[in-house]
Image (cartoon, grey):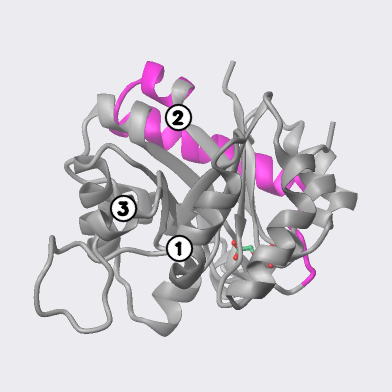
């Protein structure tokens, strides 16, 4: 039985004091046992949020990392810097990073491998555009993102250090959610691709999240799908709605 994992991706929202206020407000209600809950604030807030959640089950995640160890990379943040603030999860390949910051599958792969090297968990995002879905290319697009993004990762690393997030780009921040059956169909497809690239056992173990306009009103239906093991939540993770999503059952 795969344990559900629900992560809040705050994106570029909340100053330090706003983040503190918000976490103080919700922390007790998201401190649960049966679901892994991860908060992914901006880099500036990581250290402080780590303090605020330190005596709970809630985990700290980052929204990005650079794949080099250290050095002259102005503006970038290394994995050791993230670890020093208590980060144990890191999102890579979010569609906004692919779209606005030109992140390719190869860069996603380098970042995922760096996260694995330090034994953290990478939440690797994949997703198709509306145009690709309308042309029925979505399965091919997702398969290629997985083949290239997960290159040179071992079965053991897949099982231990990787979570996949399926986020159809047309459903992110738009209020349009994939139907539970569309989300399930793709998550099942992703599991089949993992079985092909690794093996059946690995595919059974790896957790696959759905992301894209998850809210309290649709969380239960989505999270009860057999191949959907959690949610990556954007907009709704900035409000009390996140409490309702974490306690969806
Ligand atoms: P959304 O974002 O929930 O606001 O659609 C999801 C995401 O981008 O991770």
Q: Quadrant of residue 56?
A: top right
Q: Quadrant of ligand 1?
A: bottom right
The earlier-in-sequence mark between 3 and 1 is 1
Regarding mark 1 in the picture, which secondary structure is present there? Answer: loop
What distance separates the C-alpha of mark 3 from that of mark 1? 15 Å
Regarding mark 2 in the picture, which secondary structure is present there? Answer: loop
Which dot, 2 or 3, sits closer to the camera? Answer: 3
Q: Return the residue nearer the eye: 89 or 197.
A: 89
- Where 205 falls versus 133 (above or below)? above
Name the residue located 49 percent from the left edge and 75 percent from the top edge: 96
Q: Quadrant of residue 111?
A: bottom left
Q: Can you name the residue that lies furthest to the right here?
A: 217
Report whether 188 appears left or right of 28: left
Which dot, 3 or 1, sits closer to the camera? Answer: 3
Q: Which mark is residue 63?
A: 1
Residue range highlighted in magenta: 175-204
The earlier-in-sequence mark between 2 and 1 is 1
Q: Is residue 222 visible?
A: no
Asked if the residues shown at circle 2 and circle 1 are in contact, with their CB atoms under 8 angstroms apart, the answer is: no
Q: Which mark is residue 206?
A: 2
Label the magenta part by its dominant secondary structure. helix
Asked if the residues shown at circle 2 and circle 3 are in contact, with their CB atoms under 8 angstroms apart, the answer is: no
Q: Position of residue 115 (x, y in %)?
A: 27, 48
Q: State yes or no: residue 196 in magenta.
A: yes
Regarding mark 3 in the picture, which secondary structure is present there? Answer: helix
Report whether 190 appears left or right of 2: left
What distance separates the C-alpha of mark 2 from that of mark 3? 27 Å
Report whether 78 appears left or right of 14: left
Which dot, 2 or 1, sits closer to the camera? Answer: 1
Q: Which residue is mark 3?
A: 84
Q: State yes or no: residue 185 in magenta.
A: yes
């Amino acid at each position: 039985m795969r344990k559900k994992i629900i992560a809040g991706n705050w994106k570029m929202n909340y100053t330090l004091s706003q983040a503190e206020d918000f976490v103080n407000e919700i922390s007790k209600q998201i401190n649960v046992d049966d679901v892994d809950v991860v908060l992914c604030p901006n880099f500036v807030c990581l250290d402080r949020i780590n303090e605020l959640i330190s005596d709970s089950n809630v985990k700290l995640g980052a929204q990005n990392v650079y794949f080099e160890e250290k050095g002259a990379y102005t503006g970038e943040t290394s994995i050791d810097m993230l670890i020093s603030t208590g980060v144990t999860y890191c999102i890579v390949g979010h569609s906004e990073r692919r779209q606005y910051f030109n992140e390719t599958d190869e860069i996603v792969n380098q970042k995922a491998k760096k996260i694995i090297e330090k034994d953290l968990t990478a939440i690797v995002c994949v997703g198709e555009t509306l145009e690709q879905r309308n042309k029925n290319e979505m399965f091919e697009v997702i398969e290629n993102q997985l083949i290239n993004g997960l290159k040179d990762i071992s079965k053991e690393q897949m099982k231990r250090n990787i979570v996949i997030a399926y986020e159809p780009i047309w459903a992110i921040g738009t209020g349009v959610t994939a139907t539970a059956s569309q989300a399930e169909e793709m998550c099942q497809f992703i599991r089949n691709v993992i079985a092909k690239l690794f093996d059946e056992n690995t595919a059974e173990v790896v957790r696959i999240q759905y992301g894209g306009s998850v809210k309290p009103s649709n969380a239960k239906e989505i999270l009860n799908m057999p191949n959907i093991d959690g949610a990556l939540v954007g907009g709704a993770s900035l409000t009390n709605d996140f409490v309702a999503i974490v306690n969806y059952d």
